[in-house]
């Protein structure tokens, strides 16, 4: 009986170690992490979340800005049921850093066919980057249920 207990104990320890290794691998080697580590929106007393977002840089000036040759930052926010701005235009080969948040409820931020896939959580800032090599019109979709017109919530990235 004692031999089985020992075996079981070692098995449990080995499993725990394996899961810790898997966790370390996904977070450090594969860069899998929760969105929202790019900052928060501070809501002052008497202010709504929307009011706070729209007066907090860089969300007080949403849109596209050039950071350098072939490098852009797209500052965007989700609001039921659209993204603002509705369209981003960049030349082919551009590296675009999306900095986005939500002014109301949780929204998704997903561009099929790319690595752009994050959640916009109210009060948190989500950031991701992607290089658009192929010209075309990329649809930006909300893939978190956010209410009645969730399925119509979209914007587009036009790559020329
Ligand atoms: Cu926004 Cu679904």
Image: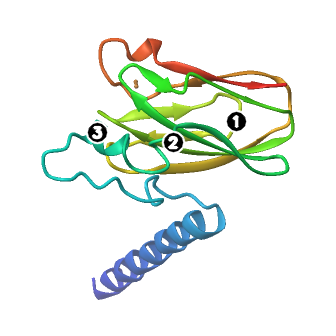
Q: Which residue is mark 3?
A: 51
Of labels 3 and 1, earlier in sequence is 3
Give the quarter of the figure containing the N terminus.
Answer: bottom left
Q: Is residue 20 left or right of residue 1?
A: right
Q: Which residue ends up furthest to the left in the rendered image?
A: 46
**Distance between the alpha carbons at the discs numbered 3 and 2:** 23 Å
Q: Which residue is mark 1?
A: 114
**x 33%, y 24%: residue:** 146
Give the quarter of the figure containing the C terminus.
Answer: top right
Disc 3 crowd rating (10 Å Cα; few below 14, some 14-19, many 20+) is some
Is residue 72 positioned above or below 17 on the image? above
Ligand 1, seen in the image, is in the quarter at top left
Q: Position of residue 157 (x, y in %)?
A: 68, 26
Name the front one of labels 3 and 2.
3
**x 46%, y 51%: residue:** 57
What coloring was used for the rendering? rainbow
Is residue 38 positioned above or below 20 on the image? above
**x 81%, y 41%: residue:** 94
**Distance between the alpha carbons at the discs numbered 1 and 2:** 12 Å
Q: Which residue is mark 2?
A: 118
């Amino acid at each position: 009986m004692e031999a089985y207990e020992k075996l079981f104990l070692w098995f449990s320890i080995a499993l725990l170690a394996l899961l810790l290794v898997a966790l370390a691998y996904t977070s450090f080697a594969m860069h899998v992490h929760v969105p929202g580590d790019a900052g928060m929106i501070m809501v002052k007393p008497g202010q709504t979340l929307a009011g706070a977002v729209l007066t907090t840089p860089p969300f007080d000036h949403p849109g596209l800005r050039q950071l350098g040759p072939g490098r852009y930052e797209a500052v965007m926010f989700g609001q039921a049921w659209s993204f603002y701005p509705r369209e981003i235009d960049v030349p082919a080969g551009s590296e675009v850093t999306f900095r986005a948040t939500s002014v109301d409820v949780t929204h998704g931020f997903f561009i099929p066919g790319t690595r752009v896939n994050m959640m916009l959580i109210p009060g948190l800032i989500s950031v991701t980057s992607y290089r658009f090599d192929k010209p075309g019109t990329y649809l930006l979709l909300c893939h978190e249920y956010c209410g009645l017109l969730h399925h119509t919530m979209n914007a587009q990235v036009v790559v020329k």
